[in-house]
Amino acid sequence: MSFIPISKPSITKKEIAYVTDAVRSGWVSSLGKYIDMFEEKFAAYCGTKYAVATSNGTTALHLVLAALGITAGDEVIISDLTFVATGNAVKYTGAKVVTVDIEEETLCIKPEAIKKAITSKTKAIIPVHLYGHPANMEEINKIAKKHNLFVIEDAAEAHGAEVNGKKVGSLGHAGVFSFYGNKIITTGEGGMITTNDEELYKKMRYLRDHAMSKEKRYWHTEVGFNYRMTNLQAALGVAQLERIDELLAKKEEIFKWYQEGLKDVKGIRLNRQASWAKNVYWMVCLELDDYTEFQRDEFIQRLKSNNIDSRPYFYPLSDMPMYDDADTPIAHKVYKRGLNLPSYFDITKEEVDYICEKVKEIL
């Protein structure tokens, strides 16, 4: 069996045609028809009034926080189990990152842990929809409303996921998406912010373009950012968005292949799905019960020796030197035993069957 990568994008004639059209138009930078088209279509897909395209998911997170006025002296509550960008974007503002524990079943932020972490300095909550499963937004929004907090969904890994039939990105003050090459839809690099708040939308568009005055060109009234997406990226994004139902259906099919192939194996767990959620299975998760981090890493190396790529779960942010320690026992238990298996669009059932057989052999 030839090497099976953890991820790779699905690029068809549609994507090539749209990007070629953008190149031929001459509009290759941050102006062009595909940017407006991508923003409008993505907002409609998520069920929001507005969307703002950005250069990547991290700049999207920072842009939202900056537009909301989050600054030094403020505190922002996030999940301890997430990619480092979630915490770093908060750090950029000067605010304090407060990491809290996760739910073992969903791998997402635990509402009860949020309640315990709120102080007079708390300004926002960033629930992360991890590996394609949404956080419990109904409970999180109740907490936020009671304490007058902003809710920013980190939906970088969960395009199309739902909570009680409503798509992520429409469930907080703003939603943030990434279009990195391994995401459900990609623009190579790129991000998007969704919102129903018109004032927030205007502020983000303003700050995204160096905070340049609309009335007086090259006049800037505050420090802004160059967080714009290019027309070339947006052209790729429009084509991918037009295929998102196809891409999500294949993700679900791949997960079912893994379920079938590993159904009789004891001591492991795959992705779960809460009764109120639609999981989009961005990454197939394999958790090895009672494994140590060393054993998990050895398992990954054994897969690699069989031409199967995989990746470990994220480390808890609170273990990293630039973040404060946190009492997050579930996050610290789960990350040691978890890894992600290949689940890209073009993977075949034969390849998944091969992976399942090797998982069983190694175990």
Image: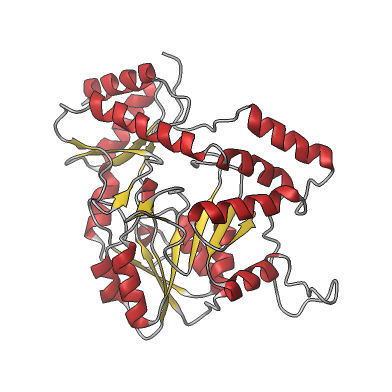
Give the residue at x 49% y 57%: 47
204 vs 35: above or below = below
Give the residue at x 85% y 72%: 217
Mark count: 0
Q: Quadrant of residue 248?
A: top left
Q: How is the image coloured?
A: secondary structure
Q: Quadrant of residue 201?
A: bottom right
Q: Quadrant of residue 295?
A: top left
- Residue 324 in the image: state x and y as whole percent: 37, 68
Left-right relation of 154 to 23: left
- Residue 310 in the image: state x and y as whole percent: 39, 33
Q: In the rendered image, which quarter contains the N terminus?
A: top left
Give whichever of 31, 313 is nearer the camera: 31
Left-right relation of 322 to 112: right
Give the residue at x 35% y 58%: 319
Does residue 165 show up?
yes
32 vs 196: above or below = above
- Residue 72 in the image: state x and y as whole percent: 52, 80
Does residue 325 show up?
no
- Residue 227 in the image: state x and y as whole percent: 67, 60
18 vs 100: above or below = above
Q: In the rendered image, which quarter contains the C terminus?
A: top left
281 vs 101: above or below = above
Left-right relation of 184 to 260: right
Residue at the extreme bottom of the image, as rendered? 120
